[in-house]
Structures are given as structure tokens and as C-alpha cells.
Amino acid sequence: MQQNHLDHKEMKIVGYKDTFIEEYETLKRAFYDYDTSYILLRYGCLDKAEKRLIELEMIVSVDKFMNE
């Protein structure tokens, strides 16, 4: 099985409540898990992930989230 190696800027997970921001492969769609209080966003770039989180009213901005 061949893996696609994406640019670092294209591989982000933005978590919420249990603060984490990590890299991930194949970034395509949002995945929700309210039981564990985090949102895994699979998008091509952090800007799209940030926009989606703001739409979901989870964070005001990624910068603010990262500094909490």
C-alpha cells in the first residue's frame, strides 16, 4: 500500500477541550465525536479547518484556541 506524503501545512488536526494540534494523513472531511469532546477536522489546510470550527461555534479562531 502506497502512502501519500502531503506537505506539513496540509496535515493538521485541530482538537478542542483536550487541547491538541497534530499532523495527520488524508485530510478530506470533518469527523465529529462529542462523547470524547474533540473534533477531528480532515481538510487540505488549517485555514479550512479553522473556518469549519468557527462555523460550528467551537472556537473563535485557531490562534486563540492554541493560546488557551
Image (cartoon, rainbow, N blue to C red):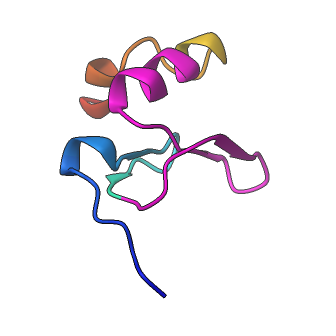
Point 45% across, 23% down: residue: 48
Q: Is residue 27 magenta?
A: yes
Numbered marks: total: 0
Q: Residue furthest front?
A: 2
Is 63 in the magenta? Answer: no
Question: In the image, is 52 to the left or to the right of 67?
Answer: right
Residue under the image location 54 percent in, 13 percent down: 54
Q: Residue 64 placed where, x, y %?
A: 30, 19
Q: Is residue 38 visible?
A: yes
In terms of depth relative to the viewer, which is nearer, 50 or 44? Answer: 44
Furthest toward the bottom, the residue is 1
| Nearer to the camera, 56 or 7 | 7
Q: Would residue 62 appear left or right of 50 to someone viewing this image?
A: left
User: 5 above or below 47?
Assistant: below
Which of the pair 42/35 is nearer the observer?
42
Q: Is residue 20 left or right of residue 16?
A: left
Quadrant of the snapshot with the C terminus = top left
Q: Is residue 3 above or below residue 54?
A: below
The part of the chain drawn in magenta is 24-53
